[in-house]
């Protein structure tokens, strides 16, 4: 399996903007490591019930975990300034388009600020799955977002099957076939 590329600022992204985005993600985690942050739960564990969540997509739809009961769901946290996130999106979109008719759902939640909504909207036009901003979502049950991209795979019975999915096991066609496809044939 190929390792994720090291963080490199894309040529069309201002390095200050990239650092600001990284600090928005990293600083709260560092502070919570030093201070007590009781409002932030730990990530859900594999084999445990998935947390309840509700998102409002950038096109105004409200999607809740309750409504997704009976579907295999991939909750995917990402950002436009994150090169590995951008790299994963085409494979995720292709798999979604091929499997959405067999009760597979992707909820892509951008961690960017509302100020960056237009950038997220423009980027998201390429993809068929729903996209939301973290600021307009109730997703605290997924815990502290300690890395990007960060995904959680939930089966039809609302059980977490893959938690804290990040690092060297990036999302590509092969890993989606390995991890998601078997869940689609389960009752």
Image (spheres, rainbow, N blue to C red):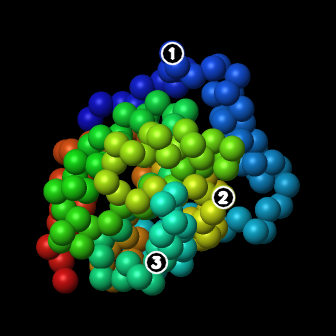
Q: Earlier in the sequence, mark 2 or mark 1?
A: 1
Question: Are the two marked residues, 3 and 1, in contact with CB atoms closer than 8 angstroms?
Answer: no
Residue 89 visible at all: yes
> To which residue does mark 3 refer?
65
Q: Secondary structure at mark 2?
A: strand
Sequence order check: which comes first, mark 3 or mark 1? 1
Which is nearer the eye, 22 or 120? Answer: 120
3 or 2: mark nearer the eye: 2
Pick the quarter of the image with the N terminus: top left
Q: Which numbered tag is attached to residue 175?
A: none
Q: Are marks 3 and 2 in contact (CB under 8 Å)?
A: no
Q: Is residue 67 above or below residue 61?
A: below
What residue is rendered at 39% in x and 45% in y? 125
Q: Nearer the viewer, mark 3 or mark 1?
A: 1
For the residue pair 167 and 181, the one nearer the viewer reads as 181
Residue drawn at x 16%, y 57% is 98
Q: Give the quarter of the image for residue 142.
A: bottom right
Q: Which numbered tag is attached to residue 11?
A: 1
- Cα–Cα gap, marks 2 and 1: 27 Å
Q: Is residue 1 above or below residue 102?
A: above
* In-front residue for pair 109/149: 109
Q: In terms of depth relative to the viewer, which is nearer, 60 or 137?
A: 60
- Asked whether, in this view, residue 32 is left or right of residue 169, the answer is right
Answer with left or right where residue 76 lies relative to residue 185. right
Q: Which residue is mark 2?
A: 135
| Crowd class of label 1 (few under 14; some 14 to 19; many from 20; radius 10 Å) | few
Image x and y of residue 18, in percent: 63, 27
Q: Residue at x 37, y 34 (%)?
A: 87
Q: On the image, which quarter does residue 4 sit in?
A: top left
Q: CA distance from mark 3 to mark 1?
A: 37 Å
Which residue is found at the position 52% from the left and 57% from the top?
58
């Amino acid at each position: 399996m190929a390792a994720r590329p090291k963080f490199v600022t894309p040529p069309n992204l201002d390095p200050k903007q990239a650092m600001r985005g990284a600090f928005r993600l990293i600083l709260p985690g560092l502070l919570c490591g030093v201070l007590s942050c009781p409002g932030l739960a730990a990530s859900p564990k594999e084999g445990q019930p998935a947390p309840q969540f509700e998102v409002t997509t950038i096109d105004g739809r409200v999607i809740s975990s309750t409504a997704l009961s009976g579907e295999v769901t991939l909750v995917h946290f990402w950002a436009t300034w994150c090169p590995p996130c951008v790299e994963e999106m085409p494979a995720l979109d292709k798999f979604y388009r091929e499997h959405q008719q067999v009760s597979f759902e992707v909820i892509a939640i951008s961690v960017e600020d509302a100020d960056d909504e237009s950038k997220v909207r423009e980027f998201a036009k390429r993809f068929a799955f729903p996209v939301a901003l973290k600021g307009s979502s109730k997703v605290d049950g997924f815990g502290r977002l300690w890395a990007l991209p960060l995904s959680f795979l939930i089966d039809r019975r609302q059980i977490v099957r893959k938690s804290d999915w990040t690092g060297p096991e990036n999302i590509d066609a092969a890993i989606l076939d390995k991890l998601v496809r078997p869940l689609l044939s389960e009752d």
